[in-house]
């Protein structure tokens, strides 16, 4: 179903790619490597992991800050557990639970340009946006025949 | 010459509306121009110039008398994108009700031919 254009606002969304190891960095912020016996440059890991998100993409959708008892029953959440709802045409955007949404805040990222990151044996190219720079995270998806509804929880900064 | 006259009317209305609407998140100049062209066609149809002996140039000149009608019609259609044929839309806690579109054409009177 078409959404009313007049109700749409410009937002940005980023998908959760997975968990990646945190690499050691030098004083300039560059990743540190060691060379193995075959001459390959292997990044030094700290032993910690972090969640990596995809490069934010622009989206236009209807976002509402209001909640209510009817919506709480539909999603199985109390009104205190979520802060906004996002509605778009069915299948328009590939948002999933855990995706980040920027509404008013500026996007901040770990890398200044697209950088290859290895996650679970796959390589992704991302600027790795910082989670706390976003405004909301998708905590529940409710797809239907004509529209997709997303329940958003605010990200504490 | 008539095409140039229509193009001038279309361009003027599009430029005026672009001033108002270009800040909208989903604004598109091409889509706005489409709505303006359609509004011009509709007013032409309503005026029923076939009942007159107007030339294309005279028709184009007459349409300038309905500048504000065409402008309001195009604005209405642009604001209606995503809800064609609807008079009311309730979406994600936002309720919108539109006035009857025919009201915008009330000032446009058709020519009639007396047989």
Image (cartoon, coloured by chain):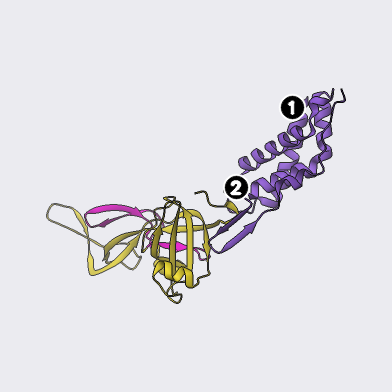
Q: Position of residue A13 (x, y in %)?
A: 44, 58
Instruction: Let me know if residue A154 appears in the view.
Output: no
Residue to which mark 2 is pinned: B81
Q: Nearer the viewer, residue B14 or B114?
A: B114
Q: Position of residue B99 (x, y in %)?
A: 70, 53
Marks 2 and 1, how far apart in space? 27 Å
Instruction: Let me know if residue A71 appears in the view.
Output: yes
Mark toward the viewer: 2 or 1: 2
Relative height, residue B93 to residue B71 (above, below): below
Q: Quadrant of the N terminus of chain B?
A: top right
**Element type where label 1 sits in the image:** helix
User: For the magenta stretch, what is the residue range?
Assistant: A99-128
Residue pictured at 69% horizontal, 40% vertical? B36
**Chain B rendering hue:** purple
Does residue B110 appear left or right of residue A72 in this picture? right
Q: Chain of mark 1?
A: B
Q: Position of residue B23 (x, y in %)?
A: 64, 54
Residue to which mark 1 is pinned: B3
Q: Which of the chains is yellow?
A: A
């Amino acid at each position: 179903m078409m959404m009313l254009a007049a109700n749409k606002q410009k937002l940005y969304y980023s998908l959760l790619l997975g968990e990646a190891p945190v690499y050691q960095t030098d004083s300039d912020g560059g990743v540190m490597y060691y060379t193995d016996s075959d001459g390959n440059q292997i990044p030094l890991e700290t032993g910690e992991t972090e969640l990596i998100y995809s490069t934010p993409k622009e989206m236009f959708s209807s976002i509402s800050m209001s909640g209510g008892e009817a919506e709480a029953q539909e999603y199985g959440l109390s009104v205190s557990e979520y802060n906004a709802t996002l509605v778009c045409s069915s299948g328009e955007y590939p948002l999933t639970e855990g995706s980040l949404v920027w509404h008013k805040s500026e996007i901040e990222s770990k890398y200044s340009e697209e950088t290859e990151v290895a996650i679970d044996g796959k390589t992704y190219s991302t600027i790795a946006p910082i989670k706390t720079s976003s405004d909301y995270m998708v905590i529940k998806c409710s797809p239907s025949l004509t529209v997709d509804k997303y329940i958003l929880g605010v990200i504490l900064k | 010459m008539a095409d140039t006259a229509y193009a001038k009317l279309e361009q003027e209305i599009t430029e005026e509306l672009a001033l108002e609407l270009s800040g909208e998140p989903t604004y598109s100049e091409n889509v706005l121009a489409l709505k303006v062209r359609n509004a011009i066609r509709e007013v032409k149809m309503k005026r029923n110039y076939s009942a007159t002996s107007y030339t294309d140039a005279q028709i184009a000149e007459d349409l300038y008398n309905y500048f504000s009608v065409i402008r309001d019609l195009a604005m209405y259609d642009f604001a209606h994108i995503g809800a064609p044929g609807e008079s009311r839309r309730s979406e994600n806690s936002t309720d919108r009700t539109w006035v009857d579109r025919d009201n915008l054409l009330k000032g446009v009177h058709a020519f009639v031919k007396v047989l």
